[in-house]
Image: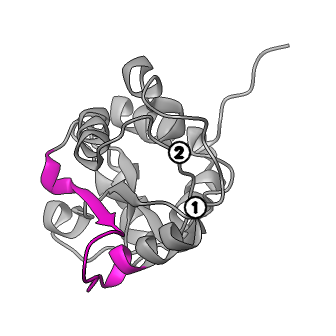
């Protein structure tokens, strides 16, 4: 998330831009770090969204990928990458979409968080909006609070079916400040 980079990561990139590739994203990954809250990932169940991006200050793709891996607290296997100076580009799926965008944007390479949805394997049923909302309703109060914070703090340009349904729930609404 844009709001959650941390100073160390933020020092290694330029300002966020909002004309990135169009990727399908959804709140469909269960996060242990966030007490079971659903987090955004690139997912075929998602809504096509023009995502934000930033230019790394690093000269090497490996270094940029490492910075993102540290920010996301994951393994390097969960960091996607395309390098446009490779002899043959046989990219498919998300990588092909990112590669085409990077080429149009005159970038040499791109890295992104490539964590898959783990909803079905963790919940034991296929992902759907109804299943996701039921899952969030069943979280502990701390988990619900983390889920609400994550959804509320997602950028306004991220509009998905799960977000729309959750934000209509009376128990999930953003608290208003007392006047």
Quarter location, residue 179: top right
Q: Is residue 168 above or below residue 160?
A: above
Q: Is residue 24 above or below residue 32?
A: below
Residue 171 in sight here: no
Residue at image mark 2: 54
In what element is the residue under mark 1? loop
The stretch in magenta equals: 75-96
**Left or right of 59 on screen, residue 86:** left
Q: Does residue 122 sit above or below 147 in this rendering?
A: below
Magenta run includes residue 23: no
Kindly tell me whether residue 77 is visible in this rendering. Answer: yes
Please name the residue shown 51% across and 44% down the image. 55
Query: Farthest top residue?
Result: 179
Q: Position of residue 134 (x, y in %)?
A: 38, 60
Location of residue 33 by image quarter: top left
94 magenta-colored: yes
Along the line of sight, the residue nearer the viewer: 66 or 108: 108
Please give the count of numbered marks on the rendered protein: 2
Rendered residue at 26%/72% (across/down) = 86
**Please, is residue 80 above or below residue 71 in the view?**
below
Q: Is residue 27 left or right of residue 69?
A: right
Colour scheme of the picture: one colour
Residue 144, numbered label: none
Q: Residue furthest right?
A: 179
Which residue occupies 16% across, 60% down? Answer: 122
Alpha carbon distance from label 1 to label 2: 9 Å
Q: Which residue is mark 1?
A: 20
**Residue 43, picture quadrant:** bottom left
Percent from the top left, x then y, of residue 91?
A: 29, 82
Q: Earlier in the sequence, mark 1 or mark 2?
A: 1
């Amino acid at each position: 998330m844009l709001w959650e980079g941390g100073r160390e990561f933020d020092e290694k990139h330029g300002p966020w831009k909002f004309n990135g590739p169009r990727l399908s994203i959804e709140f469909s990954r269960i996060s242990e770090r966030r007490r079971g809250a659903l987090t955004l990932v690139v997912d075929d169940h998602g809504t096509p969204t023009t995502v934000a991006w930033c230019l790394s200050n690093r000269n090497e793709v490996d270094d940029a990928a490492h910075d993102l891996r540290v920010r996301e607290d994951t393994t390097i296997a969960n960091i996607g990458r395309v390098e446009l100076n490779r002899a043959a580009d046989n990219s498919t799926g998300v990588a092909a979409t990112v590669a085409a965008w990077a080429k149009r944007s005159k970038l040499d390479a791109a890295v992104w968080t490539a964590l898959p949805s783990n909803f079905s394997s963790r919940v034991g049923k296929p992902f759907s909006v109804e299943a996701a909302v039921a899952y969030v309703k069943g979280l502990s109060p701390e988990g619900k609070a983390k889920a609400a914070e994550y959804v509320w703090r997602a950028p306004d340009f991220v509009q998905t079916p799960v977000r729309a349904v959750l934000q209509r729930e009376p128990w999930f609404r953003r608290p208003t400040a007392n006047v």
